[in-house]
Image (spheres, grey):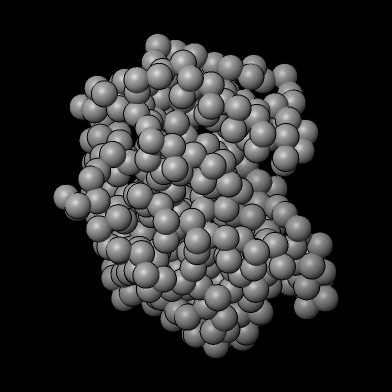
Amino acid sequence: MHTDTHIITIGYAGTLLEKHSRQFARLRQYATLVHSFHAIVFSTKSTKPSVVTDGNFTVLGTHARTKLGKLWGAYRMVNAALKDNPDATFIISAQDPFETSLVTRLFARHPRVTVHVQVHGDFFGSPYWRRESWLNRVRYWWGKRVVRRASRIRVVSKRIKDSLIALGVPAARITVLPVQGTLESFSPRDTYADTSPITFLYVGRFAAEKNILGILRAFKEARTAVPSCTLQLVGGGPEEDAIRTYITQHRLTEVVTITPWTEDVAPIMRAADVYVLNSWHEGHAMVLIEAMASGLPLITTNVGCVGDTVQHAVHGHVIAPGDGAALTAAMIALASSYDTRVAYRTQGLAAAHTIAATPDAAYAEAWVDALTADAEQV
């Protein structure tokens, strides 16, 4: 318990303004371990309330139309919390080392404030993210300054911790705490017979960093060796037109299906045979653990939780980002070998069950500890 601790977080999770959402319940549990918890959300004007309170937990929405308005609103909210509690010390945590950290840095020299930052993506270890846009290059420059000066940092994978250490951040300031997943709805189908066709599955945003066109190219090549395999893409996003064009131009409409995004992906995973992730970069990639909980062997690039939770030749095939030939070979290998699929399925289910066994209360304590730990004691 940290009964003298006051926490303020600044982030983007709009569902926190919905009192019956799972995210609200999760942070509400964190609040039971501290004196007070304010969660500031960069929100736009909507029908959602601007303030939601439950005991010592308060969610504050900026409800502004512009980024500048959201930053100003968050600054005013932090300032108000400090004035309302003149004798209290605060930990202020930014959800990322970019826009949200602009607010926390303004309070870095305040005598009653400790600045904390959370890093959910592989922004500093992978060159692909910063090459995506000029804005990401600006964020990269600013983010390096933020993480080097933060008192404490929470990351979601060892991969990200290593990238921060390479920037010169002392290891003692960094806590690795993966994203807490909700695996209750994910389970394998009753039978996993050696039948065809083998269905490869991708679930997520149709965005450039996911390299879905690379999946399509590899799948097209794999079908020359295993003609019966199929591919299902679930989601939507800016790359959807390019994806549909590729499918049409290469006459794959009979074997590749696109399913619009749904929150209920568990039944879709349960019906598939192999999960494919071909991202250039990821933060934690919780979807891989959801796939393992659904009994799916994996093909994934070496991103996110790969190397921590997901292991090559244990839970599936791990390949380098952008290696189309390796992706094709992995598809052929898994589509051709039932015994290999079963081995990866069995080991993946065991790993997912271990993760699911972590109680919510234990994770809440670990989350609060990550923000409050003394760097000299880590």
Q: Is residue 83 left or right of residue 60?
A: left
**Does 36 appear above or below 147?**
above
Name the outermost residue toward the left. Answer: 377
User: Is residue 54 in view from this perspective?
Assistant: yes
Q: Nearer the viewer, residue 364 or 217?
A: 364
Q: Nearer the viewer, residue 324 or 84?
A: 84
**Furthest residue in direction top, as rendered:** 55
Residue at position x 71%, y 67% from top?
133
**Residue 192 appears in the figure:** no
Residue 313: image x %, image y %? 31, 76
| Number of on-image labels | 0
From what the image shows, is residue 175 above or below residue 35?
below
- At 66% across and 46% down in the image, what residue appears? 261
Answer with left or right where residue 281 lies relative to residue 337.
right
Q: Position of residue 29 (x, y in %)?
A: 34, 25
Residue 298 against residue 6 in the figure, above or below:
below
Residue 52's x, y, as percent?
54, 16
* Residue 247 drawn at (x, y percent): 76, 70
Q: Nearer the viewer, residue 373 or 175?
A: 373
